Amino acid sequence: MQLTVWTYEGPPHVGAMRVATAMKNLHYVLHAPQGDTYADLLFTMIERRPERPPVTYTTFQARDLGGDTAALFKTAAAEAYERFRPQAMLGGASCTAELIQDDPGGLAKALGLPIPVIPLELPAYQRKENWGASETFYHLVRALAGPMAPAPGSPPPARTPSPRPRCNLLGPTALGFRHRDDVREVTRLLDRLGVDVHVVAPLGATPADLARLGEADLNVVLYPEIAALTARWLERAFGQPTVTTVPIGVGATRRFIEEVANLTGADPVPALSDTDDRLPWYSRSVDSNYLTGKRVFIFGDATHAIAAARIANQELGFEVVGLGSYSREQARDVREAAKAYGVDALITDDYLDVEAKVTELEPELVLGTQMERHIAKRLGIACAVISSPVHVEDFPARYAPQMGFEGANVIFDTWVHPLMMGLEEHLLGMFRDDFEFADDAAPSHLGQTSRIVEDLAAPAAHADAQDSLPAWAPDAEAELGKVPFFVRGKARRNTERYAREQGVATITVETLYDAKAHFGR
Amino acid sequence: MNRPAPALTSAPVNGCGEAPVLRERGQREVFCGLTGIVWLHRKIQDAFFLVVGSRTCAHLIQSAAGVMIFAEPRFATAIIEERDLAGMADMDAELDRVVHKLLERRPNIRLLFLVGSCPSEVIKLDLSRAAERLSRNFAPDVRILNYSGSGIETTFTQGEDACLASLVPTLPREAPEAAPSLMVVGSLSDVVEDQFRRMFDRLGIGPVRFLPPRRATELPPVGPKTLYLLAQPFLADTARALEEAGARRLDAPFPLGAEGSLLWFRAAADAWGVDRSRFDEATALGHQRAKRALERYRAQLAGKRIFFFPDSQLEIPLARFLARELSMQLIEVGTPYLHRNHLASELALLPAGTALSEGQDVERQLDRCRAADPDIVVCGLGLANPLEAEGTTTKWSIELIFTPIQGFEQAADLAELFARPVTRRKRLMV
């Protein structure tokens, strides 16, 4: 048993729902108790989808358990077929139905429906959401494209002649972090390379589209967590090469363009000289100086976390002080990446571990999921969201991809804004003694009554630490007051830590500056 | 916890007391009882809810709660894993380990609920034995109880019913010779509780106690002199447990709207023999204020046709309020479970011929709803946006649980919850 407060991933059948909901003309019949229908709201509320997920639940109750729950499933599947007339159907179980062992996948097949029925076995007590999505996509593609594959050993089928090479975009699903916009951006990028998109899947694809996957010249895997398994199979079955670079960040986008160009013989130059590529100049412009060496903690799914670390380090000049992921399946890649920044990867799905790590590292910026946003908010640290799990605000109305050059532009804005706090640091430094900038001065346009700045420098209220806290001499306390408010809390903590470590009982102005020298920036 | 068929009380003379009910079996688009933890943990402030279940359970509560506001919320899930099911780990020992870890980390917990789930029920994990065993270990500092919030046994608000029912046997027993006392049963927001307490004071009714209490250390006593008023319509098992402890229910409509609140207070006033002039004097101000405040919403909502999908069991009292105080037309009132006894006074007040449905086949109900083309639909979060996208105005029902809606002072707030989506649709020109 695992004690869990918040969870980064849902159960594997939610992964299957993300695939089913992304597609058209596919229906998923899920053997599940009443209550499991909550999953619909993930799509209708968080993602604001205007239609219900194409999922029929058996919603069995206790009184059904003594009876024939298998019959309940068969009826639900038959009625769902009659009502929705899908091109293909998925049959599976949620965690509870797995325990009653009705074999819903087998039952669905046995109905003899005139459409492909794909049984899903998603062990809910071992696996999680992304694995469930990956497995579902793989079985769908095998079942629907498999019949088109050449016999093992025979050459791949001759492709229909086409003036431009064609590729599949694999991995985007419903409820994905910016998947909708990434597809558009990568399609645009490929177009500049002279490459056409053949099928995007699962997002927007029909079962019939999946059957056509083998006709493309190559596959682009946008989200390895979901599509790497399927791409490997397509590579074996149809001899299609796979583009493995995920184009998040300027460097990765350039490598992606070169990789596609190599595989297709396309000319990479037009795509590489995209005039909308603004991040490199913005990062070099002088006011980005204050971004130098900002300490950043990164946590998310493996793909986004690794990409974020690379961008932070190479494209914004931050210092990566922590890197981690909840994607255990991709843990090795994350560990490898972490080594490059001289940190140990944090591989965990325990939210409390992540919180402890952030508290310990005291970064200046947290790049994480919605969970880390809450951690950062509590600790008063700037934060930007880079990965699932998502919240409704991660589906912005505007175009906001993460991939390609436009994605890099979006990332630059999204990460830098929380650090700006509305004022450039050098201006704060210059004007810190101005009476209007005093901590308890209200903005002049609001009159003189309200006090706007919360005192972040108040001593930490940790009861256990209280007795061992060194005392502050009045002049040291006054000096601390001159430190800009947004770093004062950290200055206080660092000074106290330094005093404790040095056995200093009373913190003087000298201790304050000794600590400053000791800890550097 | 199989529910016996509700006993029919004496047949009301008008309204919908004996109206036929459409009973349906099919896909039920409802939450399970675990969802109740979202408001119960806010209400009982030193209690902790440990769901013994699967990743789905944890994901449900997190998704239903909407945002993860609390660093360490007063609920968590002990997720059953493959090794537990395969017998590689002893479930009882595992549960003990998890509870020890939790209580070590959270020394402020005074009351711990082990909450059963679909998986724990199906594998027949005996949480009542676990609760007894752990109680012995942690007494007297922590009391450990158990109830089921599983979807196979409970629908949405029935989770609160199961929770409160598990509390009843632990309530202090009051002697038969104690003075009569009033217990208000069902969780209410603190502001509503305080208003109710002031009203009972004015009426000279007391002592008044609330179940659930705000703190686990303030459990209300129960005995043969306890009279109780249900503040929520979904408390069948809790009521039964209270009756077993000797308490008697005061029959009343639920305190929604000016009329409902008035009749609800009157049930208590009658039991305490409060004379009519004193009652009128005490309630007149609030009652009149509520009626005045409702006027402007009646102008907006009168004649509008409303359709209820089943959700919280609040549907019938809400429908009664909307029909009688705001002159709305009821197309269909769906409820997950119809407790005829507890709802007798409500059914009597419903307009004759109101279409009632119990249980659900969501696809068929959507067909009926589309055919009826109502002005507003009350439904759960899974259906609201899809219906809006089809052009139907909706009121998402979970807000009716999270918002203070009971009593005179909240009557207009309740009406506003229905008026807002209607007004919004009228305003939008895009």
Image (cartoon, coloured by chain):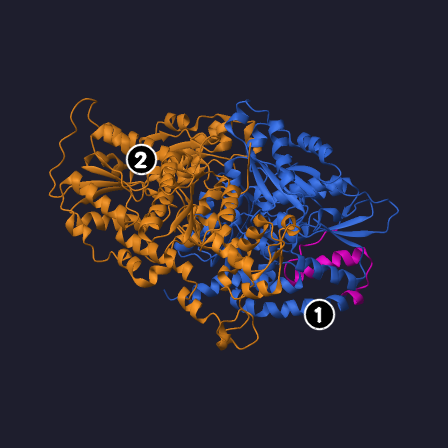
Q: Nearer the viewer, residue B312 or B71?
A: B71
The amino acid marked with disc number 1 is Leu
Q: Position of residue A363 (x, y in %)?
A: 46, 51
Q: Quadrant of the C terminus of chain B?
A: bottom left
SS class of the residue under badge 2? helix
Provide the residue designation for mark 2: A228
Local crowd size for mark 2, using a 10 Å CA cut-off: few (<14), some (14–19), many (≥20): many
The residue drawn where x is 46% and y is 49% is A370
The amino acid marked with disc number 2 is Ala
Q: According to the rendering, which colour does chain A have?
A: orange
The residue drawn where x is 55% and y is 22% is B87
Q: Which mark is residue B34?
A: none
What range of the chain is rendered magenta?
B250-279
Provide the residue designation for mark 1: B285
Q: Position of residue A456 (x, y in %)?
A: 55, 60
Q: Is residue B266 magenta?
A: yes
Which chain is drawn using blue? B
Q: Chain of mark 2?
A: A
Q: Position of residue B240 (x, y in %)?
A: 72, 41
Q: Left or right: where does residue A278 sit relative to residue B91?
A: left
Q: Nearer the viewer, residue B416 or A204?
A: A204
Residue A333 position by quadrant: top left
Q: Left or right: where does residue B192 sit relative to residue A342?
A: right
Against A466, residue A329 (above or below) is above
- The answer to whether residue B274 is seen in the rendering is yes
**For the residues marked 2 and 1, what is the alpha-carbon distance in whole angstroms?**
68 Å
Q: Nearer the viewer, residue B232 or A450?
A: A450
